[in-house]
Image (cartoon, helix red, strand yellow):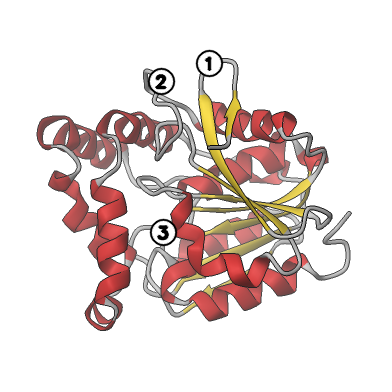
Amino acid sequence: MPFAKLPDAQLFYQWDGPESAPVLVLSNSLGTTYCMWEPQVAALSKDFRVLRYDMRGHGQSGVTPGPYTIEKLASDALHLLDALDVERAAFCGLSMGGMIGMQLGATAAARFHKIVLCNTAAKIGTPDVWNARITAVQQGGMKAVAGGVIERWLTAGYRASHPRDTSEVLAMLEGADPAGYVACCAAVRDMDYREQLHRVQVPTLVVTGAHDPATPPADGRFLAEHIRGAKYAELPAAHLSNIEAREDFNRELLAFLKSQGAHG
């Protein structure tokens, strides 16, 4: 299996698409694996060399002692690109992956052609909410929170009409490593980028879900208003817009990535 060795961990990664195509990195949400991007692979890999990976604490990647920080997780993404000899790429992250994208856009702009921030916010939730979730997982494992999380991730209508997709996402969440999940909860809890969004110096698209209770459209509009020149798209979905509104998501993503300047 393909693993990239980082200074203190190893990351699992997966390539799709032509080797000669521009690289597009996909960064997953808290509690998922690289598999969450499966609805995008066929559409994106026609024009891009798609790089998916399990972030630290998730999937097949290493689980190092927590707590983690968004800065650490962003550094991991850069180490991954270095290990794979990728000088520049486009980046698309959802939820926690979007927070990583903000950090990269502000601190490593030269490495990225474009950045897409999906279903995310400059600050997500309150410390009390995150601390309660951390305690619940520490005491009861992932099943203690998975049911509530899935209700925020996918609308009731989608869950009812797509039971297979829902069960696959739920299995991913329930299968997450509790220690890695808790360490990443701390990273999300401790990030507040509301006063730093002006530092993002990469062309940016913000994608939101009209029915997202975790990072509602107001959060996405805030990002778009405070990142210079950012574009905004709102999709008929809850938190996992890439799954629930996959066709719309793929269309918006490709239109932005392939627009002028997408490849540097």
The three-letter code of the residue at mark 1 reads Asp
Give the class, few, some or many, for how many residues have Cα within 10 Å of label 1's Cα (few <14, many ≥20). Answer: few
Q: In terms of image quadrants, where is residue 221? A: bottom right
Mark 2 lies on a secondary structure that is loop
| Mark 1 or 3, nearer chain start | 1
Mark 1 lies on a secondary structure that is loop
Q: Which residue is pictured at 71% across the width and 61% down the height?
A: 230
Give me the C-alpha separation between circle 3 and circle 2.
28 Å
Mark nearer the viewer, 3 or 2: 2
Quadrant where the C terminus lies? bottom right
The three-letter code of the residue at mark 3 reads Thr
Q: Badges 1 and 2: C-beta atoms under 8 Å apart?
A: yes
Give the residue at mark 1: 8
| Mark drawn on residue 215 | 3
Give the residue at mark 2: 64
Q: In terms of image quadrants, where is residue 80? A: top right
Give the class, few, some or many, for how many residues have Cα within 10 Å of label 3's Cα (few <14, many ≥20). Answer: many
Mark 3 lies on a secondary structure that is loop
Q: Is residue 60 above or below residue 114?
A: above
Give me the C-alpha separation between circle 1 and circle 2.
8 Å
Residue 122 in view, yes or no: no
The three-letter code of the residue at mark 2 reads Thr
Give the class, few, some or many, for how many residues have Cα within 10 Å of label 2's Cα (few <14, many ≥20). Answer: some
Residue 172 in view, yes or no: yes
Pinpoint residue 68: horizontal percent, then vertical percent: 43, 25
Q: Which residue is pictured at 56% across the width and 80% down the height?
A: 248
| Mark 3 or 2, nearer chain start | 2
Nearer the observer, 128 or 135: 135
| Mark drawn on residue 180 | none
Compared across the picture, whether 141 is left or right of 52 comes to: left
